[in-house]
Amino acid sequence: MQVGLIGCGNMARALARGWGRPLVCADPVAERAQGLAGEVGGEALASNAEVAARADLVVLCHKPAQLQDVAAEVAPAAKAVASILAATPLAALKAAYPERPVYRFIPSLPVEVRQGAVVQAADPDPWGAGEGPATDRSVNELFSELGTLVTLDDGLLDVAMGLMSCAPAYVALVAEAQIDAGIRRGIPAAQGAELVVQTLTGTAELLRSRNFDTLAVRREVASPGGLTARGLTALERGGIRAAFSDALDAVLKDGGS
Ligand SMILES: NC(=O)c1ccc[n+]([C@@H]2O[C@H](COP(=O)([O-])OP(=O)(O)OC[C@H]3O[C@@H](n4cnc5c(N)ncnc54)[C@H](OP(=O)(O)O)[C@@H]3O)[C@@H](O)[C@H]2O)c1
């Protein structure tokens, strides 16, 4: 299936690196599109309309506010469309791109290393198997290459985005805060970073192997009256749960756009 990217910014680059195969793409900054095609293979084209004409599946990677302007160029030729736009429901996408398969996904930056979470909007009226290479199944398989694919009601996609698309920034901040705490107590930054980041990776793997049971992992580390229990109490006193809850509310304010 020939994939065509509309917009070659941060998330388009992560998707392209995750798929790691030639594609066609366009961006208002031609050098950006050329750089991406040069890296993963394929071709940077002069316009969105050319991408639509050449691709079996157009992936919308521009900003949400550009939906109508881009559709005016892309809709006449696009055979099938997948969107990663935040705050843009499936109904709005289908209205902009009628009478063809339309899919809505929200990815997260780790798709670049094929370890991302990708959420897909459940479609009450799915396209099924059409005539072209882009069928519900093949598009599903394409995005599954990027990590774990989870399907949710369309109305929950922006909430999911607030969890998993924002999380790489949150986790990087949490890691940085821990590294800084270590520096304050004499651990050099480079070694502190290795210790913290490797532990993050290992903990994610451990949580997966424990069927995502966060409490079980916490109990294994925090023995009664032990040091970790003291650390956890300090974090709770610092408002860690409220901070993450407030962060999600902040992301979803104004409809998540
Ligand atoms: N970043 C994330 O973690 C993340 C996660 C989930 C979903 N998303 C969604 O992914 C989309 C892209 O986000 P991003 O972070 O990659 O933003 P970005 O880095 O700003 O990339 C957007 C790209 O689209 C280009 N563009 C602007 N107008 C265009 C047009 N008319 N036709 C084609 N391309 C156009 C932009 O060029 P200019 O800069 O020159 O305008 C830019 O290169 C957004 O809709 C966002 O909601 C992002």
Image (spheres, grey):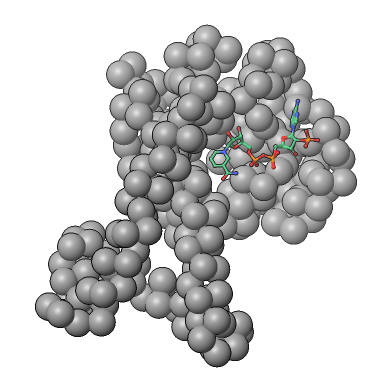
- In this view, the residue in front, 165 or 51, is 165
- In this view, the residue in front, 71 or 63, is 63
Q: Residue 193 appears in which quarter of the rendering? A: bottom right
Ligand 1 - quadrant of the structure image = top right
- In the depicted structure, whether residue 34 falls above or below residue 95: below
- In the depicted structure, whether residue 178 falls above or below residue 240: below
Q: How many marks?
A: 0
* Residue lying at 70% horizontally and 56% vertically, measured from the top left: 40
Point out the residue furthest to the left here. 224
Q: Is residue 96 left or right of residue 73?
A: left
* Residue lying at 37% horizontally and 58% vertically, measured from the top left: 238
- In the depicted structure, whether residue 90 falls above or below residue 29: above
* Residue lying at 22% horizontally and 62% vertically, measured from the top left: 214
Q: Position of residue 9 (x, y in %)?
A: 71, 43
Q: Position of residue 20 (x, y in %)?
A: 61, 57
- In the depicted structure, whether residue 216 falls above or below residue 35: below
Q: Position of residue 114 (x, y in %)?
A: 49, 59
The quarter of the image holding the C terminus is top right
The quarter of the image holding the N terminus is top right
Q: Residue 200 appears in which quarter of the rendering? A: bottom left
Q: Is residue 71 left or right of residue 110?
A: right
Residue 58 in sight from this viewpoint: no
Residue 198 in sight from this viewpoint: yes
- In this view, the residue in front, 36 or 226, is 226
Q: Position of residue 101 (x, y in %)?
A: 48, 22
* Residue lying at 67% horizontally and 37% vertically, measured from the top left: 5
